Image (cartoon, helix red, strand yellow):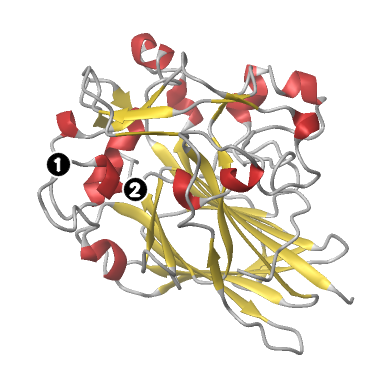
Amino acid sequence: MTGMVTVRLILYGLIAFAPNSNDSPTTINALLVDARGPQYASDGCKIPPHMPVLFAAADSCTVDGLACTVSEQVEKPRKPAISGAWLLDRESLSVEVVPAGEAHARKLIAVQGQKVASSLPANPTESSLLHWIPQMRSLLKTTAAKGPSLAKDCLHGAQNCPIVARLAIDDGRVTSCHLSEEITEEKVYPFAFKPIGTSAKAVLTQAMSDAVMVSFQVSAGSEVQIVSLDLEKKEPKRKVVLKAGEEPTIDIWVTNVPSQAHQAMEDPTCHNSSNYIDRHFQLYYNLLDTPIPFSKRAVPHRLVNEKQVLVAAAAQPKGGEGCPVLTFLDDSTPIDIQLRSAEFRDYNRVPYDWKSCGNVQVDPKP
């Protein structure tokens, strides 16, 4: 087999991103916030348990030398292309490439630092910027010169950091591949970041990224290895080996989303407004080195009466990685049914990227 293989890593859910440098990062740490136990938002609404899961899809998939399987602990996705799935539990993850016959140069390209026109993207290029990932320093009013920062143990240890997994990303093009949308209307709305239950002026107003995608290319025949170590003991937990075949892609998803079993049990008052207030966001503040009271934690409130961006499928570039959309859909179902069917939205646990992340052409230049 000749040619190149595209590797796509998609991260979705309650995940904080911490670059090692604000200017030109060489590593970005993805921190899966620990939301497995019973927790409550500042307004009393229960935050449902989240399931941190690693999914993989490739023509060849082995784990510790055996064929990959979908763990019984993982809620089954409908997408049939999944090769393996594992529940994450206090793990440090890394993605390594074993090239076939030639060296693979590792280089991180983070699309950030560029100015945007407003609280919503003005074009597909703007929609992919890391600008749409909320920065904690922008969300908190503080007199400290540098503002709040992540606890050091979240990046260099784990014993005192409430995360369930950590992934170090040092290769590939990193973008805010999708922005949060109202799926029935296909519109992207801005969010106002402020504490729950207050009329205070928003600390920040902007659209918000649903998922982050990392994409890069390797020579055909290369192995992509996902190595998992225990966060504290650094002992090996598993090694997943992925290889492409006829399909020149290797897909990896790291997700941290609410369990389906608890969604139906949610308080109706909390559930009805869940699309407008992201209470789960309060848990990000647990990772800071300075404790912040829950009542003062700014979280996203969707501004339904504000200007929005209409996401028209026909207007999107073919295979455009800048398209600001994320959907959880089954590709065997007609699109017009997919977009409006609660069944498909509720039971697909893997981000299906039919609008944005499919057929991504990796730009080798920064």
Task: Say what amino acid the circle numbered 1 marks.
Answer: Ile
Taking the spot 43% from the left edge, 64% from the top edge, the residue there is 28
Can you tell which quarter of the image residue 294 is in? top left
Residue closer to the observer: 308 or 224: 308
Can you tell which quarter of the image residue 89 is in? bottom left
Distance, label 2 to label 1, CA atoms, is 15 Å
Above or below for 146 versus 328: below
Q: Circle 1: is it few (<14), some (14-19), or many (20+) Cα within 10 Å? A: some
Point out residue 289 in the picture as x, y percentages from the top left corner.
17, 55
Q: Which numbered dot is residue 292? A: 1
Q: Secondary structure at mark 1?
A: loop
**Residue 232 horizontal side relative to residue 236, left or right:** left
Task: Say what amino acid the circle numbered 2 marks.
Answer: Gln
Point out residue 325 in the picture as x, y percentages from the top left corner.
63, 36
Point out residue 147 in the picture as x, y percentages from the top left corner.
18, 53
Question: Disc 2 marks which residue?
Answer: 135
**Residue 239 horizontal side relative to residue 339, left or right:** left
Taking the spot 26% from the left edge, 49% from the top edge, the residue there is 137
Taking the spot 45% from the left edge, 57% from the top edge, the residue there is 113
**Residue 316 horizontal side relative to residue 111, left or right:** right
Taking the spot 13% from the left edge, 51% from the top edge, the residue there is 290
Most extreme residue toward the left is 143
Residue closer to the observer: 55 or 279: 279
